[in-house]
Amino acid sequence: MTLVIAKRVQVQGRNKIYNKVSLSSDSRINFGTAGNIDYGVKIFSIPTKISLPISSETGKEEIAYNNSLGLAVVGSAIHSYTVKESISDILQHLQYIPNTMELSMKNIAEFVLKFFTKTSLDFGDILQKESKCILVLAGYCAKEKKICVFKFCIDDSTYPIKPYCEEILVDNEIDFFGSGAEEAKKIHQINKQLNEFQIIRKVIADKNIQSVGGGIQYGDICCDVNGEYTNFEVFGVQDYALNDDGTFKEYLHTLRGLTFYKDEFESAVNDFHINLTFKTPFTKEIEN
């Protein structure tokens, strides 16, 4: 399965206080007894554009909402990727009529739920429990002037199964999803000073949890008290490797489980260079 961590926290910027919601995960996709790969994409930035009805007077399109939402996927790769690909197209071509509905993250989530319900029922008929997945969607809400987060799950305690969505991370808190969630919760309870990068790294290093592995994926979205917000952006993560004796070996610049600036990527002078922003959560560990 996987490990996804969703977290809301208040951070101090240069001149402002921001609310930040982050989504992070490992990179392993399992194929049962056939094996696994460690560069599965689990954190996405989904462009979303919502327009007003075209004016009969001007004939011009007016954009009411233009932002990128954050999406994290857990569980069945084929199911979650099907939903992701469907909404990636549709969310860029939405229109709403003022006074008949609200331009809110709740309504966006309910729209996404229609796709999640359709695919959950169809995949469930074919793959049964192997089709289960969880989605976590985060984005700026134009109505509430804040970042809202929703999770999409399947209640299979009844037949037929019931897909649903609910809002999470209403306050500053952290939530865990996937097969590595219980171990991640234990690590968090023992030491609440650890950030999401450190927690995921510890679970990845645990050889007893074979379903979690690869590199760390991360993305976040921020909003200040005045409602100024950023798009959800996916970042690379600077990790590191040790020698057999525990000494520092090398930096690892990873994005979605792939390691850049060495071996297959950017190994020659005439290669394309990958222009990414990297988070550096392990600086103190490396210094120590």
Image: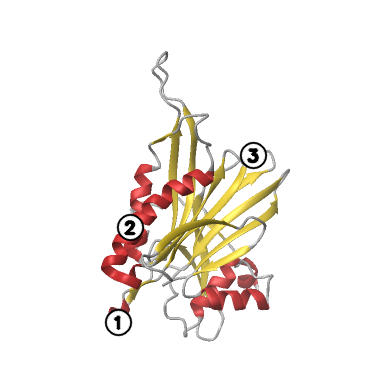
On the image, numbered disc 2 is attached to which residue? 119
For label 3, count other residues whose C-alpha is less than 10 Å away and answer few (under 14), some (14-19) or many (20+). Answer: some
The image quarter containing residue 168 is bottom right
User: Do the numbered discs 1 and 3 sit on residues whose CB atoms are within 8 Å?
Assistant: no
| Residue in the picture at 44% in, 41% down | 48
Gap between marks 1 and 3 measured at Cα: 48 Å
The disc at residue 227 is 3
Q: Is residue 212 left or right of residue 197?
A: left
Could you say whether the residue bearing mark 3 is in a helix, strand or loop?
loop
Kindly identify the residue that appears in the image at 47 percent across and 71 percent down: 178
Task: Compare residues 149 and 273 and report the one nearer the observer.
Answer: 149
The colour scheme applied to this rendered structure is: secondary structure
Residue with the mark numbered 1:
33
Crowd rating for badge 2 (residues with CA inside 10 Å; few <14, some 14–19, many 20+): some
Q: CA distance from mark 3 to mark 2?
A: 34 Å
Placement of 206 over or under 55, stated as above or below: below
67, 82: nearer the viewer:
82
Sequence order check: which comes first, mark 1 or mark 3?
1
Most distant residue in the top direction: 57
Residue 237 position within the rendered picture, expressed as x and y whole percent measured from the top left: 51, 62
Instruction: Tell me which label, 1 or 2, sits earlier in the chain.
Output: 1
Q: Name which residue type carries label 2.
A: Thr
**Label 1 to label 2: alpha-carbon separation:** 25 Å
Judged from the image, the secondary structure of the residue bearing numbered disc 2 is: helix
User: Which quarter of the rendered picture does the C terminus lie within?
Assistant: bottom right
Horizontal and vertical percent for residue 272?
Answer: 35, 51
Check disc 1 and report its element: helix, strand or loop.
Answer: helix
User: Mark 1 or 2, which is nearer the eye?
Assistant: 2
Image quadrant occupied by the N terminus: bottom left
